[in-house]
Amino acid sequence: MLEASARAGARECGYVVLRLPHEVKDLVSEWLAIHEPYKALQVMTLVREVHGGRNYNSSFGVRQRGSGAYAQMNSDRYAGAVRRLGLNTERATLDCSRFRVPDDQAELF
């Protein structure tokens, strides 16, 4: 995915470990059971592995990247691919001068 993105012109990338809070866990489990029954147990096991045995870990700094050996392996693979593809070498600067507070936002409520 990173390689295709780099070929298409991407210069920056990032990743987030799959998080399954609350009702989302049940939806994903049901979808896997229907569409990928032979992979469902493996997927859910890996999700729990990166979240300390749970489907979701809300701890700041951990919830996006996970923890444990599998999360570290994914982080290392990501870092290697980013280096190899020359991604994230410079950050884009954002131009905030065009931002303005909407006048009519109160109409939304």
Image: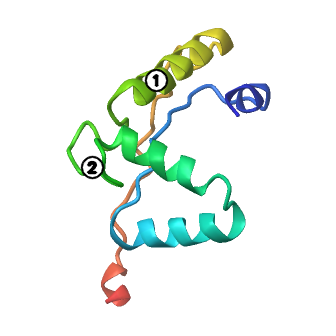
The x and y percentages for residue 80 are 57, 13
In the depicted structure, whether residue 79 falls above or below residue 104: above
Task: Name the amino acid, label 1.
Answer: Ser
Residue 82, image quadrant: top right
Secondary structure under badge 1? helix
Farthest residue, direction left:
59
Task: Name the amino acid, label 2.
Answer: Asn
The x and y percentages for residue 69 are 39, 24
Query: For the residues marked 1 and 2, what is the alpha-carbon distance in whole angstroms?
Result: 17 Å
**Residue matched to label 1:** 75
The residue positioned 30% from the left and 84% from the top of the image is 106
Residue 101, can we see it? yes
86, 79: nearer the viewer = 79
Identify the mark at residue 104; answer none if there is no mark: none
The residue positioned 67% from the left and 71% from the top of the image is 34
**Residue matched to label 2:** 57
In the depicted structure, whether residue 15 falls above or below residue 88: below
In the depicted structure, whether residue 44 falls above or below residue 9: below
55 displayed left or right of 18: left
